[in-house]
Image (cartoon, rainbow, N blue to C red):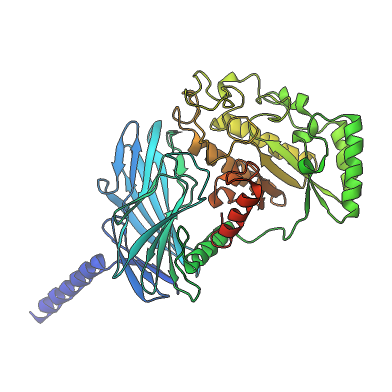
Amino acid sequence: MKRVFITTLSLMVLLASACAWAQEPLRLENSRISLSFDRKSGALTAIGNKLTAEIYGICGDEWEVEAVEFQAKSADLKLASLSCQGEVVTARYASDRIIVEVTYTLHGENHFVEKQLALTGSGVHGLKKVTVSRPTFSCPGLQMVPYRYPKFGHAPGREPECTFFGRTAKGGLFTGLEYSFDSSALKGDNVILELAPGLKMRAGEKLLCEPAYFGVYQHGPFDKETKDLPLQSESDAMVAMTSAILGPPRFGLVPIMNGWMSQTERGESTEQSIAQDMKALDVMAQCGIDWYSDAHPWGGEISRMNVLGADDKYQPGPMVQKFLEHARKLNVKVMLFATLNNTHPWAAGKPFRQDRPDWLIDAGASRPANAPAWRQSGKGNCIGVRDFREWLDRIYLEAIAGGPYQGWEMDGDFFGGMGAVGQLVPADCQSGKHDHLPGNSDYASQKALTQIMAGIRQDSPKTYIEAFRPSQDLGIWALKYVDSCFTLDEYGVQSGNLASGDIRRELATRVLL
């Protein structure tokens, strides 16, 4: 009898322990931040700010996927698994239409966590909207403050990226998406972190969405409320996070002569122009500058680039080889001036791959009625076409390997033009033949550009990557694989270059742009 009683009692203790474990939140933490997750839903339920000893409760850390063919919500899908391995918590949800993996990653002793959705569809789906999270935060005295940046130059109805600060008496939290021009908003106390991808998903292929971030900070002695700007401690917390994500400078201080601004040849190369440009290299080297940013795309071989075919390889011609050899003798490193979707938007260029008219902007459709005059259909390729991007990837990598070029730079825009200001003109290819939904190619274009630069860094890690347009107008998250960014506002959006430069410099001291 005693043995039965003891066995029964032991079983009751085990059951009670199991129930307590099931109710106990799953935790992820370091010395600065702690995170609590609900074991039944997999959602983030609280953030602990160890810098201030505050707890921020969270309601509504839910995701939602809206496709042309279906809608899926975390509240409606069963949690298939929840695990914690090292610094990563992974929640997996599944239905017959889609599998969603949600990861929360805490990087060492950093003060923030990243939440990322990975989507795998069962068929070909048109992905219209992705809500990464819809949190409402609670803490005594908490005040939500949105801060959008860049502060000027964006199109009406197209808001730039936003960081949402939750301020308290001691410090606070911050959250947002690592993406330029998202659909995030603050409605009352509810923060909505949302993207509008406009992508066509392929069956069985995993799509990694841009992460959301959740971070904490502590007020400092220099905090002072200024209209339309974050507090100094908030700016410092954001700068520290972006610095951690982007990584340290890979090359240190690099003095570069910009050929475009230095009166070297901008158009087609000739024997005379190559000779003059080599003299410019001599002067530059005597001044102690050992990097040269080419002034003409593709070494000035525009006519060759205009007729590249499916299997053609990039190989610099005799005149370009002569120039590169002279640079080598002077120990000057040359940056390849590459273009995105037109071989030379400033001269006699054409869209790449004349044999593929289906790759053109607006292929099979008309230009939008309200498009600016310069926004011409067919002037450039649509980088939202995966086959085109993969072909162009190969051309870039061959150019770097065969140049030899020590650097790679990009300028232009998503339309085949001379560099439309990114904030003012979202990519809006109307074609129904491409890998994006008609009329919304902005996300597809930005993602393709990021993938191109990521591929160069992976395949050729010693290549210096410099960004002009489109990246320079798309905010900090467009620079994940960039070593330097040209940020001069040539168009004088704010009453001229000097005034605009002053504004950019002032903002740069507060928040990275």
Seen at 77% across and 51% down, the residue is 256
- Residue at the extreme front of the image, as rendered: 495
Q: Quadrant of residue 246?
A: bottom right
Q: Quadrant of residue 402?
A: top right
For the question of whether residue 55 can be seen, the reply is: yes
In depth, the one of 211 and 137 nearer the eye is 137
In depth, the one of 408 and 205 nearer the eye is 408
> Which x, y percent locates residue 10?
18, 76
- The quarter of the image holding the N terminus is bottom left
For the question of whether residue 212 can be seen, the reply is: no
Q: Decide: is 364 above or below 237.
A: above
- Residue at the extreme left of the image, as rendered: 1
In depth, the one of 401 and 423 nearer the eye is 423
Seen at 58% across and 54% down, the residue is 503
Q: Decide: is 185 above or below 242.
A: above
176 left or right, relative to 299: left
Seen at 35% across and 60% down, the residue is 144
> Which x, y percent locates residue 121?
39, 37
- The quarter of the image holding the C terminus is bottom right
Tell how many labels. 0
350 left or right, relative to 132: right
> Which x, y percent locates residue 438?
45, 27
Seen at 87% across and 50% down, the residue is 284
> Which x, y percent locates residue 358?
56, 21
